[in-house]
Image (cartoon, grey):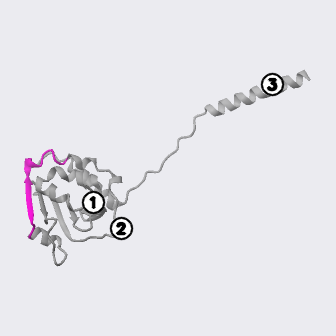
Amino acid sequence: MKTNTKLTKLSLVLLLTFSLISGCAKPEPVVQESIELDPVKQELLNDINSLAEINDFEGLSVSVYWAHPETRYRAKLTLDQLIEWPDKTFNLEGDDIKGKLDLFGQIQAEDIRLDPLQRGDVARFYLVIESVEKGKLFDILLFGYRGDIFIVNGVHIMANQKILDMIMPLLNYDAKYNLRAYGEWF
């Protein structure tokens, strides 16, 4: 009987030892597959983020066109009509833009949700950043009655407060004030 007890104790010690050793073994690392972004979303993200890296503001301009929020039109206002006959407009050029593009570098993939329906409505607010050298670098179109959709660089995305926050430093008081009337995001 004593031999049986010693054998049982030895078996338990060995079992416990093997359990501890196997519990201390390093687990194999889990390799996560990189999540590839939609190519349209990736290009848009790259375009937006690259604006924060601009250091030379010579030849750079920002133009903003908007319709007063209380103005009503018989037909839908197109982008061309908004640019041609805006209720209000203003421009920034060169060093006036310096320090106002920093928030463009903080936009991340999760801030951009594509709108698969590509909806739109009456063009009410348009901002464009252009370079004499490279042409149009960025533009954003906001709508009057469909405040849940933006068109950024030709891509329809769901409205996002972070996107609006990035353009705010580029706006004058009137533009900021009127922009508040366009949507539910404020």
Amino acid type at image mark 2: Pro
Q: Residue at x 63, y 33 (%)?
A: 23
Q: Write down the residue under mark 2.
A: 116
- Dot 1 corresponds to which residue? 184
User: In front: 128, or 37?
Assistant: 128
Is residue 32 in view?
A: yes
Q: Residue at x 70, y 27 (%)?
A: 17
**Cα distance between the residues tagged 2 and 3:** 68 Å
| Distance Cα–Cα, label 1 vs label 3 | 72 Å
Is residue 100 found inside the magenta-colored segment of the image? yes
The region drawn magenta spans 85-101
What is the x, y in percent for residue 171?
14, 53
**Decide: marks 1, 2 in contact (CB < 8 A)?**
no
Residue 9: give its label: 3
Element type at mark 3: helix
- Residue 143 vertical position relative to residue 111 in the rendered view, above or below: below
Does the segment drawn in magenta span residue 168? no
In front of the other: 11 or 133: 11
